[in-house]
Image (spheres, rainbow, N blue to C red):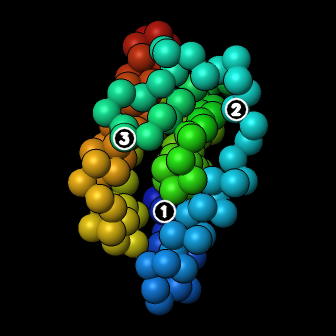
Amino acid sequence: MTIQEAQNQIIEEFAMFDEWMDKYEYIIELGNNLEEFGEKNKTPSNLIQGCQSRVWLNGEMENGKIIFTADSDAIITKGIIALLVKILSNRTPEEVMNANLFFIEKIGLRENLSPTRANGLVSMIKNMKAYGLAFNSMIK
């Protein structure tokens, strides 16, 4: 599945809900399904700056693809990073660097976040793309 297909799938999933409270519940459910991050990975270097809540992100290269793991101490934020992990994990560094994350606008996520959470979302995306850039430069 491509990044575009993964985003289209998320757009379809969110279209099933009429109310944003239902969409938030789904986001929370996605966060609950994140793989175990482990306390040992909750280091200052994995902590994303610019988020109101604490969000940890780690990326590792496996077979030419970045595997992201993440966690947060806030349930909605954990769901938001879970959405990003779902789309950007197991992709090549170039795919991550160049990803156009159109699903955020299509599902109305950005407009339904507080300004501080929206800033956090931007920071999460920047960090994931920075992993893509860093791993891409290591390959070349």
The crowding category of the residue bearing disc 3, from other C-alpha atoms within 10 Å (few below 14, some 14 to 19, many at least 20), is some
Q: Which element carries disc 1, helix, strand or loop?
A: helix
Q: Nearer the viewer, mark 2 or mark 1?
A: 2
Location of residue 114 by image quarter: bottom left
* Residue at the spot 69% in from the left edge and 54% down from the top edge: 32
Q: Is residue 107 visible?
A: yes
Q: Nearer the viewer, mark 1 or mark 3?
A: 3
Q: Which element carries disc 2, helix, strand or loop?
A: loop
For badge 2, the amino acid type reads Phe
* Residue at the spot 59% in from the left edge and 36% down from the top edge: 70
Which circle's residue, 2 or 3, is located before the other in the chain? 2
Location of residue 28 by image quarter: bottom right
User: Residue lying farthest left?
Assistant: 115
Figure label count: 3
Name the residue carrying label 1: 7
Q: Which mark is residue 37?
A: 2
Q: Nearer the viewer, residue 79 or 106?
A: 79
Residue 54, horizontal then vertical, whole percent: 48, 34
Name the residue carrying label 3: 52
Mark 1 near mark 3, Cβ–Cβ under 8 Å? no
Q: Which element carries disc 3, helix, strand or loop?
A: loop
For badge 1, the amino acid type reads Gln
Q: Which quadrant does the C terminus fall into?
A: top left
Q: Is residue 2 visible?
A: no
For badge 3, the amino acid type reads Gln
Mark 2 near mark 3, Cβ–Cβ under 8 Å? no
Horizontally, is 37 left or right of 94 in the view? right
Location of residue 94 by image quarter: top left
